[in-house]
C-alpha cells in the first residue's frame, strides 16, 4: 500500500496574496495539484491533503483529487500529520510531502517508497553548497543518520554541513503513527515537530535511512513570488525537455509554455511565444505559430494555428486557423 500525506495548511504570508499559497499556479496548475498529479503518476493508493487556512477554497479546488484532513489550529508539522487519522490503520509506506513544493519528481518519490520497504523512516536529503536555512543532517562515523538539527539550533560548525533536510519523508505507516503518539511539544513554540519522530524511532531501535539527491530545485518550496517564478522555470524546463526528447520541435523552449496535462503527437512544431494549457492535445504534423494561446483544445493532424486564441475548441484535421482568431467553444 502506497499512501501520501500532503501538508497544505499554511497561509503563505510572504506571497502577499488573498489566495492560499498552495493554489498559486505553476505551469497553469495549482502547486498542490501538481504534487497530487506526480503522486498519482506513480500509482499512490491514498492521498490525504491536510488543509487549514481557507480550507473550504482549497478543498473546493481539489475536490475529487484526494482525501482531506483539517488542521485547526496549526501546531507544527507533526501535528499536521496527526490529523490524517484515516490512514492510521493502513499498512505499507506513507510519504509526507509539501503542497508548496511543486517540482518534486516521480523518480524522487519512487526512490523514497522503494528505500522505505526496508526501513521505518527514510529522509530525503539534498547536497547543497550555498547558504540555506534548511536543517542539517548529522551522521555518525559509519555514515548512519543520527539526527536533524534545525538551522536556528545549529552551531557554526554544523551550519557548514552541506547535507540538508528537505522535509520530505517516507515512513512505515504503522511506525509513523506509533511514533506520533510519543511526540511532545516542549519547545518555545509549543508545536509538534515531525523531525522529532526520527529520534523517537531510533531510540526504539527502528531503522532510519536517507536518500540523497543533488538537485536543490527538486525540493525547494515556494514562499514568495520570486520563488514561484523560479518554480515555473524549473517545471517548464522539465516539461519541455521531456516533449523534445519525444520528437516535438521547439524553436525556442525558453518562451514555449506547456501545462503538465497537455499532449502532443509526432512531428509537431511549436514556434516561440506559444501557450498550451489545460487538457490540450495537438495531433501529428500540426504546426503552432507565434502568438497562439490554446486551452482545453483538441487540434487535429496537419493543422496550422496562426497567432490565435482557442479555448474549449475542437479543430478538425487539415484546418488552418488564423491569423488573429479568437475562438471559444468552437464559436
Image (cartoon, grey):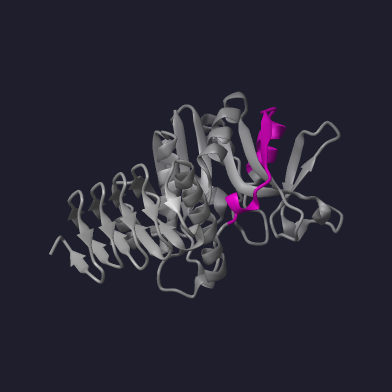
Image coords of residue 104 (percent x, y): 53, 47
From the viewer's perspective, is 196 left or right of 101? right
Q: At 49% across and 57% down in the image, what residue appears?
A: 253
Image coords of residue 237 (percent x, y): 52, 54
Q: Relative to the observer, which residue lies in front, 176 or 267?
A: 267
Image coords of residue 112 (percent x, y): 58, 35
From the viewer's perspective, is 180 left or right of 309? right
143 to 126, vertically: above or below: above
Q: How many labels, in total?
A: 0
Residue 219 visible, this angle: no
Residue 201 visible, this angle: yes
51 to 325, vertically: above or below: above
Residue 57 appears in which quarter of the rendering?
Answer: bottom left
Queried whether the magenta region covers residue 195, the answer comes back as no
Quadrant assignment for the N terminus:
top left
The magenta-colored residue range is 197-220
In the current view of this chain or complex, which residue is farthest to the left?
331
Q: At 60% across and 40% down in the image, what residue appears?
A: 182
Image coords of residue 63 (percent x, y): 29, 51
Amino acid at each position: 500500500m502506497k499512501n501520501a500525506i500532503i501538508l497544505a495548511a499554511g497561509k503563505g504570508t510572504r506571497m502577499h496574496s488573498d489566495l492560499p499559497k498552495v493554489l498559486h499556479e505553476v505551469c497553469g496548475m495549482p502547486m498542490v495539484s501538481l504534487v497530487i498529479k506526480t503522486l498519482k503518476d506513480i500509482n499512490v493508493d491514498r492521498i490525504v491533503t491536510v488543509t487549514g487556512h481557507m480550507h473550504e477554497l482549497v478543498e473546493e479546488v481539489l475536490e475529487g483529487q484526494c482525501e482531506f484532513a483539517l488542521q485547526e489550529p496549526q501546531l507544527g508539522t507533526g501535528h499536521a500529520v496527526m490529523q490524517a487519522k484515516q490512514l492510521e490503520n493502513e499498512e505499507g509506506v506513507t510519504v509526507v510531502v509539501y503542497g508548496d513544493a511543486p517540482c518534486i519528481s516521480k523518480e524522487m518519490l519512487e526512490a523514497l517508497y522503494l528505500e522505505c520497504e526496508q526501513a521505518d523512516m527514510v529522509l530525503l536529503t539534498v547536497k547543497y553548497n550555498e547558504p540555506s536555512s534548511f536543517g542539517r543532517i548529522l551522521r555518525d562515523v559509519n555514515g548512519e543518520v543520527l539526527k536533524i538539527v534545525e538551522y536556528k539550533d545549529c552551531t557554526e560548525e554544523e551550519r557548514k554541513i552541506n547535507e540538508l533536510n528537505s522535509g520530505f519523508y517516507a515512513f512505515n505507516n504503522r511506525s509513523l503513527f506509533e511514533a506520533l503518539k510519543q511526540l511532545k511539544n516542549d519547545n518555545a513554540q509549543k508545536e509538534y515537530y515531525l523531525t522529532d519522530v526520527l529520534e523517537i524511532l531510533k531510540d526504539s531501535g527502528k531503522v532510519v535511512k536517507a536518500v540523497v539527491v543533488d538537485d536543490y530545485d527538486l525540493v525547494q518550496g515556494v514562499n514568495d513570488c520570486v520563488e514561484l517564478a523560479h518554480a515555473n522555470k524549473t517545471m517548464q524546463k522539465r516539461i519541455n525537455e521531456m516533449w523534445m526528447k519525444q520528437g516535438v520541435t521547439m524553436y525556442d523552449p525558453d518562451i514555449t509554455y506547456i501545462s503538465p496535462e497537455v499532449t502532443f503527437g509526432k512531428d509537431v512544431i511549436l514556434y516561440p511565444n506559444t501557450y498550451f494549457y489545460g487538457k490540450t492535445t495537438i495531433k501529428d504534423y500540426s504546426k503552432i505559430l507565434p502568438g497562439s494561446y490554446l486551452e482545453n483544445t483538441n487540434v487535429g493532424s496537419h493543422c496550422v494555428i496562426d497567432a490565435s486564441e482557442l479555448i474549449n475548441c475542437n479543430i478538425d484535421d487539415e484546418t488552418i486557423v488564423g491569423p488573429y482568431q479568437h475562438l471559444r467553444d468552437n464559436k
